[in-house]
Amino acid sequence: MTKKRSSFSGKIGFVLAAAGSAVGLGNIWRFPYLAAKYGGGIFLLVYLILAVTFGFALMTAEIAIGRKTGKSAIHAFADLDKRFGFVGILASIVPIIILPYYSVIGGWVAKYLTVFVSGGASAAAQDGYFEGFIAQPFEPLGWFLLFIGLTAIVVLFGVEKGIEKVSKFMMPILVVLTIGIAIYSMTMPGAMEGVKYYFLPDFSKFSATTVLAAMGQLFYSMSLAMGIMITYGSYMKKDVSISSSVSQIEIFDTGIAFLAGLMVIPAVFSFSGGDESALGKGPGLMFITLPKVFNSIPGVMGSVIGALFFILVLFAALTSSISLMETVVSIFRDKFGWGRKFTCIVVAIGSILLGIPSSLGFGVWSHININGNTFLDMFDIFSNSILMPIVAFLTCIFIGFIIKPQTLVDEVELDGKPFKRKKLFTVMIKYIAPVCIVLILISSVLDVLGIVKI
Ligand code: PHE
């Protein structure tokens, strides 16, 4: 006898949980930085086109696989064709690697939130504050434990009572905060230069790498190729439309990324007097530059905006880590038949152990690195630049030529539901997406080897 699989209560619950996974740290710091670097408006346009073609096809495919099989990645592929079970295993490795280090960064966000809430804006704006904080052995570990503990509690409560409830609460707040801070940011002195920089296309910055960078970002941003959408699809009721859910998740994810640009770029421009290099790259933007920007806002407003910003980032990071942990939990439960509570505890302890090197890698263990890449960087590179493109490529080949796109089209059209971009889906999955993914893989391997810098 098989146990009944948990499910989301309906469409809104599903869409908000999936959007919660998609909207994460990548939307808030990586998207604005990339958009600024690759020619503003032109990058936005390329990203948008890719989202409704490439992103749409891959997301639809993963959700349909999950719902059709009712399994997490580890069994879903094997269920459809035994010979391809290994793709499910590869896909399952990705969230196991990402969850620990993502939670280390989530812990940093929680720390910054408390700093701003307790009026520490000026301390956080000091040069060297961030580097000093992450180099400590114990404090970042404590925040990491708190973050992963919070994630585990939600997952412990299950799909409907945990994940869905939290997503329904956090996602609307996240939208309101993003819009509010974006409006505030655009009214800062000198901010309009940033708005122009963000919107006006600079064609001289457009090249093939613009498309590749946009594609890589899209992939990560939509939480693809890591089994998440397969797991969430397996919790989706059969009478919910996959096609329109995917459209809504896309709008959510792309909309928040777009607004994050309006929140970050004008504020940084206002602070730096139009110097675009202040946008920096990676975590530096969020943990070094933005605290300085908030601290430069006169009066109490700096602490208020800073605290609201870090609440927003914390919510975005939490809903993403919840999706990661739920995916890992569902993999172990499917594999070993364990109960939810026991699996959650095992996964939480395992992730803590795996996360410790990432947390210590900026301080006591910083001597262990490859070309300056710490543990956290290495986990990130291996999962995002190598494993994910391989999983996505194999998924496309599997659907396109083994089980055939029609199998998933039937799942999307179940109950007479419409599938608006059906033709596009088939062509994308069979031909265009695999070629694009191979290009992403080649460019990221070259990037890792230091041959070409993206
Ligand atoms: N999609 C998330 C983002 O844009 C990233 C993410 C990674 C989410 C891993 C879940 C798991 O930040």
Image (cartoon, grey):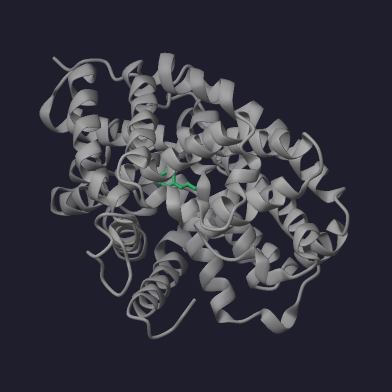
Point out the image quarter for the N terminus.
top left
The image shows residue 372, relative to residue 292, as above or below, that is below
The image shows residue 109, relative to residue 433, as above or below, that is above
As drawn, is 354 to the left or to the right of 127?
A: left
Image spot of residue 209 (x, y percent): 54, 78
The image shows residue 220, relative to residue 124, as above or below, that is below
The quarter of the displayed image where residue 173 is located: top right
Give whichever of 311, 441 is nearer the camera.
311
Question: Residue farthest to the left?
Answer: 336
* Residue drawn at (71%, 70%) of the image: 276
Give whichever of 438, 410 is nearer the camera.
438
Q: How many marks?
A: 0
* Residue drawn at (55%, 29%) of the image: 16
Image spot of residue 225 (x, y percent): 36, 52
The answer to whether one can see residue 233 in this image is: no
The image shows residue 93, relative to residue 166, as above or below, that is below
The answer to whether one can see residue 295 in this image is: yes
Image spot of residue 50 (x, y percent): 58, 61
Image spot of residue 81 (x, y percent): 19, 48
Give whichever of 105, 164 is nearer the camera.
105
* Residue drawn at (51%, 26%) of the image: 240
